[in-house]
Amino acid sequence: MVRYPLSTLAVVACLLAALATVASSSSPAATPIRVTFVGDSVSASISYSTIAKKQLSRGLAVRLDVEVCRRLVQPSCTFQGTTPTTALQAVESYGRSLGQVLVVKVGYNEDGRGYGAGIDRVMRAAIRNGAAGVVWVTLREAGQYASLYRRTNAAIRNAAKRWPQMVVADWNARSAGKPWFGSDGLHLSARGAAELAKFLRPSVFRAASLG
C-alpha cells in the first residue's frame, strides 16, 4: 500500500472541494425571473398561441393576466356580461407575488385622459409589491382611434422620465408597416403574437436588472 504524506492528502482534498464548488455553480439551477403580464384583448393573442407563450416564457416564469375590455385605472368596460379588473386592481391583488417584472399593455379601451396619473398609481403599486422594474408597452397608433393612442403613448414616454424603474417597449415603432394584425390593425395574428413575445424579452431582462 502506498502511503501519502498528510500534506499531499490535504492538497487533494482542497482540489476536490474546489471542483465540487465549480460544478455546483455551473449547474442550470438558476431561478427564472418571475414576470406578471397585465394586458387587454390585444395582448390576449399571446395566451392563445403556444408558440408565442413558449417564446415569451423561455428562461422566465410568466403569469399572463390578459382580459378583454380592461382599462388602466378607470372602471373597465363590460364585454359579454363580464367586467374585468383594472390594471391597477390586478397589480394590487397579487401583492408580493407580483414578481420581479411587471409588463403593462393596456390603453386601447380608453381615450388617454388621465393616463399619465394612472401610470403613476400603477408604478407605485408595482414597486410597493416588490417589482424591480416595469415594462410599459406603447400602443399601436392605427385604426379609427389612432389619435387617442398617440396621446396615450405621449403619456407613457413622459412617465418614463419620472420613473427610472420604467422601461418603454415601443411596440408602435416595432410594428409599423408589419402584416401582423387583424382588420382593425390592432389585434394580433398568430405571427403577430409571436413577434410581440419576442420583442418584449429584451425589455423584460432590462427591467429585471433595475432592482
Image: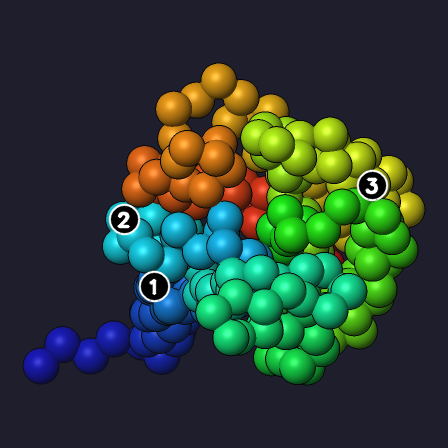
Query: Picture quarter containing residue 83?
Result: bottom right
Q: Name the residue located 31 percent from the left edge and 42 percent from the top edge.
A: 190
Q: Name the residue located 86 percent from the left edge and 38 percent from the top edge.
A: 158
Q: Of callouts 3 and 1, which one flags the residue occurring earlier in the amino acid sequence?
A: 1
Q: Secondary structure at mark 2?
A: helix
Q: Quadrant of the C terminus?
A: bottom right
Q: Amino acid at mark 2?
A: Ile
Query: Picture quarter containing residue 92?
Result: bottom right
The residue labelled by disc 1 is 27
Q: Looking at the image, is 201 positioned above or below residue 57? A: above
Q: Residues within 10 Å of mark 2 (few under 14, many from 20)?
A: some
* 127 and 208: which is toward the camera: 127
Q: Quadrant of the N terminus?
A: bottom left
Q: Report the disc number at residue 155.
A: 3
The residue labelled by disc 2 is 51
Does the residue at mark 2 contact the one at mark 1 (Cβ under 8 Å)? Answer: no
Q: Secondary structure at mark 3?
A: helix
